[in-house]
Amino acid sequence: MSLESMRHFGTLPNSTQVEEYTLKNSTGMHCKILTYGGIISEWSLISKDNERVNVVHGFPELGSYLKSSAYFGAIVGRVAGRISNGSFCVDGVNYQLTVNDFPNHLHGGNVGLNRRVWEVEKVSDTSITLSYLSPHGEEGYPGNVQFYARYTLNEDGCLNIHYKAKTDQATPISLTNHSYFNLAGSGNILDHSLQISANHHCRADAEGTLIEKKAIDHQSGVSFLNAKIVRETLPQIDYQHGDLYFLATKTNIESVSACLEEPLSGRVLKVYTNQECLQLYLGKGIPSVPSQQQGSFSALCLECEGYPDGVNTPELGDIILQPNQEYSHLTTYQLSN
């Protein structure tokens, strides 16, 4: 990697340095990765009008990430999503996690993987591998867990994300990337077309607590089995938030799990994953930052993950990693004009 592809991004209050690495391919596509939270701070391409367009939300400096609760572009975990009441039992031992989204534990707690500085293990012009050792008891989780995250940008516009983890004690693991996408690069996502390959979803209450797995009524607005315009479905989506979908493509990395399209530019984002679930978040709660074209529905998330509350309801998706196992999560986002 050339020196101009790495730059100092900021310094944490404890004097820890944060770096930014830029992955590039020959088409002019750029993907910027921070060592803080493994954040994808920018994913941009050259448009048909020869302009650079960034399709993910991010901040230009570290201070905004430290103050934000939006998880822009970050690695989320140890468990992405909400664990009911922030508690679970493994091998006869009860564990109480940080309750940071009452009454639940959300996205790994107050200081989850999104707020840790990751080490750079390996880097090139097109790929970077980060690592983080999460100690036993961090945010209430059992086990010492070694995490790895590898990002690879390919010539065909694919951003491949591969998470791995090993533990010395049984513990729940289910990571995701929390990028917010707007394929137009500005405005909102209400006129984007969205398709999700799912026949079942999980309802949630006003606090986001997962309630029950249900077959999707494909005549309703919560169904994206056939592509729909987001604006047209919004009135039928609970709290205008977005549901957790059980993917029909689970464990099949070769099949398209979701597809997002922006009609004016014709830009398309395809999602492939070996995970069982996809959390759709429509971005209703994005804080308004006028200078950065952010705010409600200015972007949406397609979070590939395991079933978040699987530690309490393993019949819907077991997310416990045992010491003799390796966690391996593959997700590919393919972007094209």
Image: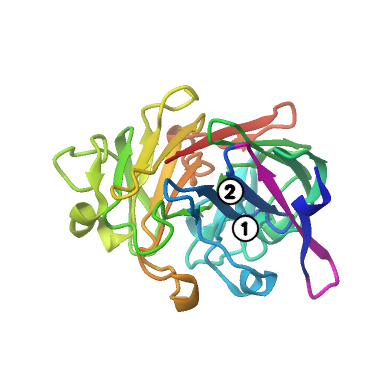
Inspect this view and state whether residue 325 appears. yes
Inspect this view and state whether residue 147 appears. no
* Residue at the disc numbered 2: 79
Q: Work out whether residue 163 or residue 171 is closer to the camera in this orientation and state it.
A: 163
Looking at the image, residue 268 sits to the left or right of residue 6; the answer is left
Count of marks overlaid on the render: 2
* Residue at the disc numbered 1: 96
Looking at the image, residue 327 sits to the left or right of residue 35; the answer is left
- Residue at (23%, 38%) from the top-left corner? 216
Instruction: Give the mark nearer the N terminus: 2 vs 1.
Output: 2
Q: Work out whether residue 149 or residue 288 is closer to the camera in this orientation and state it.
A: 288
Furthest residue in direction front, as rendered:
50
Q: Work out whether residue 8 or residue 118 is closer to the camera in this orientation and state it.
A: 8
Furthest residue in direction right, as rendered:
15
Q: Position of residue 258 (x, y in %)?
A: 38, 37
Foreground mark, 2 or 1? 2
Residue type highlighted by circle 1: Gln
Q: Position of residue 80 (x, y in %)?
A: 54, 50
Residue type highlighted by circle 2: Val
Q: CA distance from mark 2 to mark 1?
A: 14 Å
- Residue contact between numbered discs 2 and 1, judged by CB atoms under 8 Å: no
- Residue at (19%, 59%) from the top-left corner? 235
What's the magenta region? 12-26
Magenta stretch encompasses residue 47: no
Q: Position of residue 9 (x, y in %)?
A: 74, 65
Magenta stretch encompasses residue 25: yes
- Residue at (41%, 51%) from the top-left corner? 183
- How many C-alpha atoms fall within 10 Å of the one at disc 2: few (<14), some, or many (≥20)? many
- How many C-alpha atoms fall within 10 Å of the one at disc 1: few (<14), some, or many (≥20)? some
SS class, disc 2: loop
Q: Position of residue 336 (x, y in %)?
A: 45, 38
